[in-house]
């Protein structure tokens, strides 16, 4: 039996880190793609995305796995129900995100994805009785403080940010006990909604309310761009799955902060969204919380590694 050499391990880690970085950058610049699709309605884009992600996953699954491996999850009714629930949650998350980006709320989506890892911790405590370290408690307190600053100043709850964080956190909690490959998992999270999405797309296009009717003579290339939304969704997810298998969770978690940071920069400088000082203060409070959170995760990772080495 061959053993991995230090060189092999280093190469594997570099490949995993590359996948994580490309994935995070990809997600960070995706708002540019969604805004390119204007004037196609967000609701229409969402239905196309559901259908085309399912198509891409079917093709990828058939290429990589046997029919028996693909159909195996259907043997467990409880597992199928979990996939349907997970699919509804990730669809809700996608829907909120695409609508928000095309309604010029990119900055608020960034808040959602900054606080999402902390929200996952809350669900871990509530659903799985996980313990909070002092670092996580501090991070959660600061995240709540940052959101509270926004609520007090603007006198409104950042519904988009909280909606994104909550839907993805519940989705992550549902996925905790899934033991299938990512492609098969995503396939079953979208395939049950795909027929409904296809029916809606046909109806909208036939009645003149779909993507084609919304585009002018010089804009038909955007329909071609729309056809890539499934690939553009599935590709970074595949990279993320590859990274998760090759690098530690601490490094993976840190790279996840790249995407909302890039989106924030795009929201301020490219899309010219209003960004007041109070928003900067709120972000700064959340960022300090993320520093505490990351440091706590680093200490936990280091302790776990030392414990394994002693064994």
Image (cartoon, helix red, strand yellow):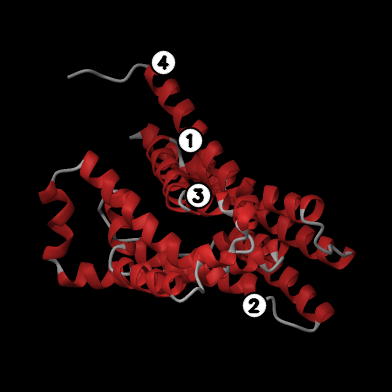
- What residue appears at the point 29 percent right and 67 percent down from the top-left corner? 83
The answer to whether 129 is drawn above or below residue 57 in the figure is below
Mark 3 surroundings: few (<14), some (14-19) or many (≥20) residues within 10 A: few
For the image, the number of numbered tags is 4
Residue labelled with disc 4: 7
Mark 4 surroundings: few (<14), some (14-19) or many (≥20) residues within 10 A: few
Residue labelled with disc 3: 224
Q: Which mark is residue 85?
A: none
Q: Is there a contact, CB below 8 Å, between mark 2 and mark 4?
A: no
Q: CA distance from mark 1 to mark 2?
A: 31 Å
Of tags 1 and 4, the one toward the viewer is: 1
Q: Position of residue 196 (x, y in %)?
A: 33, 73
Residue labelled with disc 1: 19
- What residue appears at the point 84 percent right and 62 percent down from the top-left corner? 275
Identify the mark nearer the N-term, 1 or 2.
Answer: 1
Q: Is residue 269 left or right of residue 116?
A: right
Of tags 2 and 4, the one toward the viewer is: 2
Identify the mark nearer the N-term, 3 or 1.
Answer: 1
Q: CA distance from mark 1 to mark 4?
A: 18 Å
Is residue 94 something that shows in the picture?
Answer: no
SS state under label 1: helix
Q: Is residue 231 left or right of residue 132?
A: left
Residue labelled with disc 2: 159
Q: CA distance from mark 2 to mark 4?
A: 48 Å
Of tags 3 and 4, the one toward the viewer is: 3
Q: CA distance from mark 3 to mark 2?
A: 32 Å
SS state under label 3: helix
The answer to whether 129 is drawn above or below residue 298 in the figure is below
Q: Position of residue 216 (x, y in %)?
A: 62, 60
Looking at the rendering, which quadrant does residue 60 occupy? top left
Identify the mark nearer the N-term, 3 or 4.
Answer: 4
SS state under label 2: helix
């Amino acid at each position: 039996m061959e053993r991995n050499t230090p060189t092999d391990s280093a190469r594997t880690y570099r490949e995993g880190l590359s996948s994580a970085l490309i994935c995070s950058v990809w997600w960070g610049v995706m708002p540019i793609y969604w805004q390119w699709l204007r004037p196609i309605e967000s609701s229409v884009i969402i239905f196309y995305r559901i259908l085309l992600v399912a198509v891409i996953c079917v093709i990828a699954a058939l290429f990589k796995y046997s029919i028996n491996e693909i159909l195996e999850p259907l043997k467990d009714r409880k597992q199928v129900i979990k996939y349907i629930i997970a699919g509804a949650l990730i669809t809700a998350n996608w829907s909120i995100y695409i609508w928000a980006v095309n309604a010029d709320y990119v900055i608020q989506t960034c808040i959602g994805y900054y606080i999402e890892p902390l929200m996952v911790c809350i669900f871990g405590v509530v659903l799985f009785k996980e313990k909070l370290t002092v670092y996580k408690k501090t991070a959660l307190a600061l995240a709540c403080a940052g959101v509270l600053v926004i609520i007090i100043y603007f006198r409104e709850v950042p519904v988009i940010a909280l909606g994104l964080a909550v839907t993805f956190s519940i989705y992550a909690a549902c996925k905790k006990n899934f033991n299938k490959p990512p492609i098969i998992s995503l396939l079953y999270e979208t395939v049950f909604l795909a027929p409904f999405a296809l029916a809606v797309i046909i109806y909208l296009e036939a009645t003149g309310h779909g993507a084609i009717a919304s585009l002018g003579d010089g804009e038909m290339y955007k329909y071609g761009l729309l056809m890539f939304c499934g690939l553009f969704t599935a590709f970074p997810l595949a990279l993320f799955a590859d990274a998760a298998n090759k690098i530690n969770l601490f490094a993976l978690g840190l790279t996840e902060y790249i995407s909302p940071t890039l989106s924030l920069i795009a929201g301020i400088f490219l899309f010219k969204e209003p960004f007041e000082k109070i928003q900067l203060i709120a972000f700064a409070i959340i960022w300090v919380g993320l520093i505490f959170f990351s440091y706590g995760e680093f200490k936990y990772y280091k302790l776990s590694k030392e414990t394994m080495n002693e064994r």
